[in-house]
Amino acid sequence: MPIAVARRLLPPGSIVGVSCNTPAHVHAAVRDGADYIGIGAVYGTQTKKLTEPLVGVRGIAAMLDGLGESPIKAVAIGGIKATNALRILHSAIAPNGRPLDGVAIVSDIVASREPAASATKLSRLIRAFQQEFATGIGIHSRATIVGSIAVEPALERVQSLFQEIKKSSPLVHQITNNVVATQSANITLAVGASPIMATAADEMEDLSRIPGALLVNIGTLVPDTKLGMLEAGYFANLNGKPIVLDPVGIGASTFRKSSVNGTCSSLRRNVQPIIKLCNVELLDRWQPSVIKGNAGELAAFAGSTEVKSKGVDSVGSGFSDPALFVQALARQERCIVVLTGKTDYVSDGHLVVCIENGHELLGQITGAGCMAGSLIATFCAAQASLTRGQSGSAAIEGQLVDRGMLYAAVGGLLTLEIAAEQAVPADGSAVGRGTFLSRLIDRVGFLTQDDITRLAKISIQVPGSPKESTRTGLRE
Amino acid sequence: MPIAVARRLLPPGSIVGVSCNTPAHVHAAVRDGADYIGIGAVYGTQTKKLTEPLVGVRGIAAMLDGLGESPIKAVAIGGIKATNALRILHSAIAPNGRPLDGVAIVSDIVASREPAASATKLSRLIRAFQQEFATGIGIHSRATIVGSIAVEPALERVQSLFQEIKKSSPLVHQITNNVVATQSANITLAVGASPIMATAADEMEDLSRIPGALLVNIGTLVPDTKLGMLEAGYFANLNGKPIVLDPVGIGASTFRKSSVNGTCSSLRRNVQPIIKLCNVELLDRWQPSVIKGNAGELAAFAGSTEVKSKGVDSVGSGFSDPALFVQALARQERCIVVLTGKTDYVSDGHLVVCIENGHELLGQITGAGCMAGSLIATFCAAQASLTRGQSGSAAIEGQLVDRGMLYAAVGGLLTLEIAAEQAVPADGSAVGRGTFLSRLIDRVGFLTQDDITRLAKISIQVPGSPKESTRTGLRE
Amino acid sequence: MPIAVARRLLPPGSIVGVSCNTPAHVHAAVRDGADYIGIGAVYGTQTKKLTEPLVGVRGIAAMLDGLGESPIKAVAIGGIKATNALRILHSAIAPNGRPLDGVAIVSDIVASREPAASATKLSRLIRAFQQEFATGIGIHSRATIVGSIAVEPALERVQSLFQEIKKSSPLVHQITNNVVATQSANITLAVGASPIMATAADEMEDLSRIPGALLVNIGTLVPDTKLGMLEAGYFANLNGKPIVLDPVGIGASTFRKSSVNGTCSSLRRNVQPIIKLCNVELLDRWQPSVIKGNAGELAAFAGSTEVKSKGVDSVGSGFSDPALFVQALARQERCIVVLTGKTDYVSDGHLVVCIENGHELLGQITGAGCMAGSLIATFCAAQASLTRGQSGSAAIEGQLVDRGMLYAAVGGLLTLEIAAEQAVPADGSAVGRGTFLSRLIDRVGFLTQDDITRLAKISIQVPGSPKESTRTGLRE
């Protein structure tokens, strides 16, 4: 029934809502003057077939965008529960910054044995999100905090994470590819943390209760492992554990791309045209804190055709403006984005940290990028540990991605890359690719926070802004 | 029908039996004066649903214990065949040493094409067990053999196993986690044996026919691999191959614990209260010769809360009385138990061998414990080879766990730990975690039996007994 | 209906065909004077149960052999499509060199939306095969090309492949065992190529479109991975990518043997009696360019009882005439066959290249043979790249196995084995098994084409022919 007809039939002041399944529906609802829209169905059910395609978690934001500046309210609907509401609220923010006004929840309250308690829990969660969104430091927050572009405070953040790893030896749960599992475990041990490389879906809930961080690396993705990844990330989100996603070789096959990132469906309006909105599978289920890849992988992930990949490798000279790319992708994905290469670019959507450390041998052994992922996850675990220490749980209940993970990502990269520089003999004698890996792990074990401070070559910028801070580590 | 009623209805001298599914049933049967009890069902069937829970292989012993000193006979029933009878008889021994009096077998005889041959085979197997139980050297034997606490004879046993490995290069089939598969294969090769790392359930029967040993390590357990483990262990038991179980990270998740060790259901009476009787999955199907773990793992396995674990690591200072713990657990599980740590404790249920060798770097790389498991399995293969050579097959037909595996476990640990000491430069210069692994495998390859004799730091005790023998290897 | 009866009923000049499902049927058809035979069904269907056993791709040749020199035509039938026709034509060549005269195709044309285009495509493919068969350089070609037995030109071929690897860095897709995945990737990187270790069946079609080569190694075969292998090989054949098959441990279990090689069904007439024709699974679906194994593996693969294996290792002194064995097996399998050992034997069915390089430490670490497979696949990718560059696609459309892969196999082996010699210190000091692997990968990375030319110790022979060329690399 058209809205105009409904308004004629209803008494004045009636509230009229419209179900929207596509951006076109939203456009029509704005044109026809609806009071609110219901966006959905977000998730499918197993009991009945839906006649419309699923909007998916990641499709909500594009539809919110269609509301523009209109006063029309929006709620998401379809399969939403206390256990996924935060993931949906976090993801469903339009490019212009507009969030959902609410979520429609049925069975999680109606079918609950304790409807009042369920409703209270949901209400608390949504309010926590709204408070965090309005004023907090989470990466989704409307309170746009552009951190300092000064280098020294950034390195101090990295140092305190490094100390925290040594102190608390956090558990780093890694679902990674079987090519690099050994070295990933060893480099995690070398920096002082405790790795566990478990993939069975059946044990993910239990493992998620142990504080630390989760790494998901799709290098040798198979359906069974994907089930483990879906579960692990879901429970990690529920328990506030940071997740590092390493979409290895995502450009190599549709299977990888759709497992993470679905079919690209539409363009967002206010981000670079190189970045497309994609439906997702893994990312429909959970929110990563960090997404890390080389140029070919991040291009494939974002639907950009600017950079090609061959298997797991990136081809060519990369993005024309990598800093802008990572900044835009971080804003879109609402998490830290790490672009690895000769220069690494790390962004929280505002700041972009560039790292010039490393050694070419890292590109000549298998799994250097995977080890970077392990180390980033280790630093994320430390950041989560510090955050738990500093603030009450209420303050972080509404937050899925801590902006401090920017420094965790920087710390993980610096650890790997400075150790790589140290692994090469100072006298310039040649090191083979076989012995290099052993020497690299040696050096990560010997690395001190003073090494990091002394040798880091980083600069920080805000793309589009003239100011930029550079600091180059000097070797004695 | 109550027993008293049955006795009234039946002629004098009638034999009255009672089916028992719980310890309470056994208690009632004793009280009411049954002539025998049938304990079951041990196994389920696929064709009908049982109305009572399964007793399981590991539940029988607790129910036998309820018979105390009474003259009531006991048989197990439900799914028992020639292929699992030995596993059941071996496991179903009450803490007070009381075995089953028999097993009830239906289809394996009745549905056999050659009922007489089937019955003969079963009868021979049961008699072999009973003979071995009464007088043999298997670890389940009633003939309690407390071996020598002198150190030199123990080291001679280790030496002869070392020689046998070099001579026969036994096949060591390893179903292990994918983090350590490479180094596990390499350390097996380095000591002189032949590894095969096969996990497909379809090939386990074939592989079990090749003499050697089997290692089962649950470090990256997934359902498919678990199927392989169930099959591999079953056929290993059938073919008299020793099995080493390494329950890596068993405390990390219910999935791991229940896959190996089920839900803890009741306490045994005469063992330390820290050790509970557990239903099992893997262990419902097969009998290991050696169970090896760190303090956190063995605590989780045994249901003890004395030691906690974090992921795959043990937390804190370990058991208050580790020697007593391993002795009690070895008696309960009727196999060799190895507790690894700064000091290792190895027991056959009577003797406890303590090993002080090793180096802290073993704790700083991934998979040192897994390599210990591989080397123990290799020495077990040598012990099985020597046993086959020494005795007729009839003598060992009734035996699932050879007490000589105590020395195999000691040999495997000494090999790893002495090589680790040698892998560190004598001049005290630092070795990194990356190069340490390569050097360790080098040294295992170079290790001689003289090194073992010269450098072993072991002592042997019988907990509760004042005597203890200590011998410390001296370095030149 | 007997042929004689049919002839009586039909007008003179009628063409009478007979369906043949066994060699006995063929024998009867020859005896009774059929005009043509239809051999099948080659493949089963999922919709109806066949009453006769499948002939399978590899069963056709034996039945063709039964036609002897008779003028009776033969076509294969049952499940044949454009996508598998080339595989069938390639494989279905009798030992006496007789190919199929055609294939019977129904649904691929009749059920096509564009029957004319489908028929044209099929016709072109079959003509390409026939042209190639009559005059080409593919290994199946009737134009028997016995290449030069001079050593220098062979080494020049190897050199140009080595250069091509450095130049084009081909993608080498490897489905290998999880014990050696890391070192396989690293050795591929070290020689200058780009490895991808993907196993999911879902992504095989996509990966097959990237030029390069495919390695299939069954060292830790499990059903899921086997699905990936079936798909990967099928699409590799379709896209003209060379495949290296490494049947690791094939003698260890019926599961491995039947997964690759099926039940041995009959003897071919004109090859050594040690070689049997086997039904296959992997090989029913795709044609490898190279089959590589140690003596125990190739004996198990070929159904020979001359050499035994224990797990993944070969036992005893090997074949009495290894050169003749590999030559015969290459002719039977219509691909390059590589027999590794102290001396390696490589054959294209005519030439046999013997390689004397290597070091005993290669036999003392896990996965040396697997790394040989990776390097052979890398050289095959280079050969495919050169072939694409040299000839139009029409010339190679009818060809599944390029005879130039002989030099690719030689190149891969020389790279590994010369690097192994260089990895051992020139001063004769001992190298451990642990550090050897790192040093080996170092040396592969440092290896030059001059090293290969200078240090290669190869000879070339045509078994049965008196001439043989030997060249031994001299060390300065």
Image (tube, coloured by chain):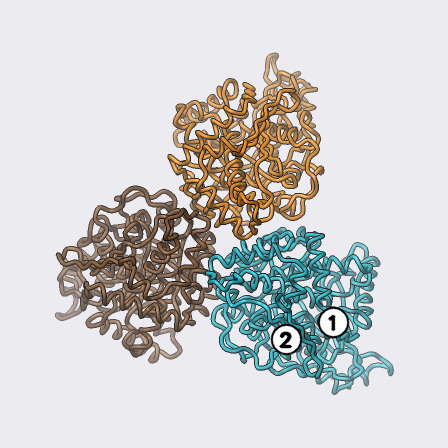
Chain colours: A orange, B brown, C cyan
Give the CA distance from mark 1 to mark 2.
Answer: 16 Å
**Foreground label between 1 and 2:** 2
Could you say where residue C55 lies in the image, as x and y percent from the top left?
66, 73
Q: Mark 1 vs mark 2: same chain?
A: yes
Compared with residue A97, is residue A294 higher up or lower down, i.e. above or below? below
Amino acid type assigned to the residue bearing label 2 in the image: Val
Q: Name the quadrant of the N terminus of chain A.
A: top right
Q: Secondary structure at mark 2?
A: helix
Q: In this image, C34 relative to B442: left or right? A: right
Residue A257's image quarter?
Answer: top right
Residue position for label 2: C326
Looking at this view, is A394 or B432 the one in front? B432
Crowding near the residue tagged with mark 2, few <14, some 14–19, many ≥20 C-alpha atoms within 10 Å: many
Crowding near the residue tagged with mark 1, few <14, some 14–19, many ≥20 C-alpha atoms within 10 Å: many
Do the numbered discs 1 and 2 sit on residues whose CB atoms are within 8 Å? no
Amino acid type assigned to the residue bearing label 1 in the image: His
Residue B35's image quarter?
Answer: bottom left
User: The disc numbered 1 marks a residue on which chain?
Assistant: C
Compared with residue B247, is residue A79 higher up or lower down, i.e. above or below? above
Compared with residue A182, is residue A278 higher up or lower down, i.e. above or below? above
Q: Secondary structure at mark 1?
A: loop
Could you say where residue A317 lies in the image, as x and y percent from the top left?
70, 39
Task: State the residue at coordinates (47%, 39%).
Answer: A214
Q: Which mark is residue C29?
A: none
Residue C473 in sight: yes
Q: In this image, B376 relative to C292: left or right? A: left
Could you say where residue B62 lies in the image, as x and y percent from the top left?
23, 56
Residue position for label 1: C140
Residue B1 in sight: no
Looking at this view, is C64 or C29 the one in front? C64
Going by the picture, which residue comes out furthest to the top?
Answer: A12
